[in-house]
Image (cartoon, grey):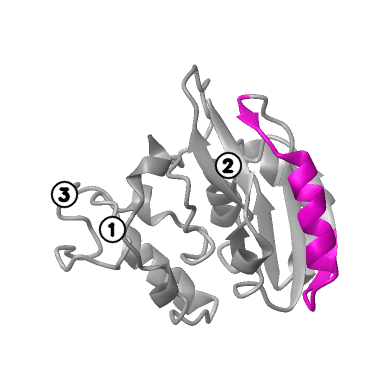
């Protein structure tokens, strides 16, 4: 099992820009979602200079086929948003970001591990439940799980033809991150703020 912790507004505001759409996932009971903290953060964000264009409450964002269908119901809201902040576990954020390669997607939560059965996630994405989610800095692609070495400071230099030197059939996670940043014209200046010594105690 796992639990999500809502990020502080100071973690979200520097990364968000333009029309910002909030999406919250309340569906999976394998994940404890902090609804009261989420409501409090919404008030803080609305009182800031951030332009909130709307809010969508969905469930089971980790189910890619299901989420694709839900896109059709909220197509206009999603297409007109400049930034989308996802309040879910890391799998939900990655699934959503993967379906929207041209959008800036941020994580509104940190995900922590809890002992117990986690169920079966219908997704090709994985969440390490590291407790300090970096997806907002890396355009919705997790550097911990997408990189075989779990590097937080960029490419190791061992990739060849876009493939990882550890897992030969795996695409280099950091190349994927930089390709998407280029595609959506996102500056990599914020990556310097992300680089830190990883706190492994949070993922215990």
The number of numbered discs placed on residues in the rendered structure image is 3
- Image check: 79 left or right of 148? right
Residue drawn at x 25%, y 64% as measured from the top left: 162
Give the structural element (helix, strand or loop) at label 3: loop
Residue 191 or 59: which is nearer the viewer?
A: 191
Q: Which mark is residue 151?
A: 1
Any part of residue 74 in sight:
no
> Which circle's residue, 2 or 3, is located before the other in the chain?
2
Q: Nearer the viewer, residue 16 or 74?
A: 16
Relative horizontal placement of residue 188, taking residue 13 as reference (left or right): left
- The mark that comes first in sequence, 1 or 2, is 2
Q: Position of residue 197 (x, y in %)?
A: 31, 60
Rendered position, 93 above or below 85? above
Q: Element at badge 2? A: loop
Distance between the Cα atoms at labels 3 and 1?
13 Å
Residue at numbered disc 2: 89
Q: Which residues are magenta?
A: 30-54
For image coordinates 16% across by 68% down, the residue present is 157
């Amino acid at each position: 099992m796992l639990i999500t912790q809502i990020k502080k507004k100071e973690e979200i505001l520097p990364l968000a820009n333009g029309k910002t759409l909030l999406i919250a996932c309340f569906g999976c009971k394998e994940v404890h979602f902090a609804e009261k903290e989420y409501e409090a953060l919404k008030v803080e964000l609305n009182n800031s200079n951030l332009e909130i264009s709307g809010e969508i409450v969905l469930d089971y964002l980790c189910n890619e086929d299901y989420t694709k269908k839900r896109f059709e119901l909220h197509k206009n809201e999603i297409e007109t948003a400049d930034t989308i902040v996802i309040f879910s576990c890391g799998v939900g954020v990655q699934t959503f970001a993967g379906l929207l390669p041209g959008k800036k997607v941020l994580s509104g939560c940190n995900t922590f591990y809890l002992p117990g059965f986690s169920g079966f996630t219908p997704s090709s994405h994985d969440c390490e439940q590291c407790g300090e989610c970096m997806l907002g800095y890396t355009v919705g692609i997790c550097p911990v799980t997408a990189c075989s070495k779990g590097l937080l400071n960029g490419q190791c230099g061992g990739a060849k033809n876009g493939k990882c030197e550890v897992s030969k059939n795996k695409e280099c996670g950091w190349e994927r991150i930089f390709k998407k940043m280029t595609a959506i014209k996102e500056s990599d200046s914020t990556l310097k703020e992300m680089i830190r010594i990883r706190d492994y105690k949070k993922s215990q």
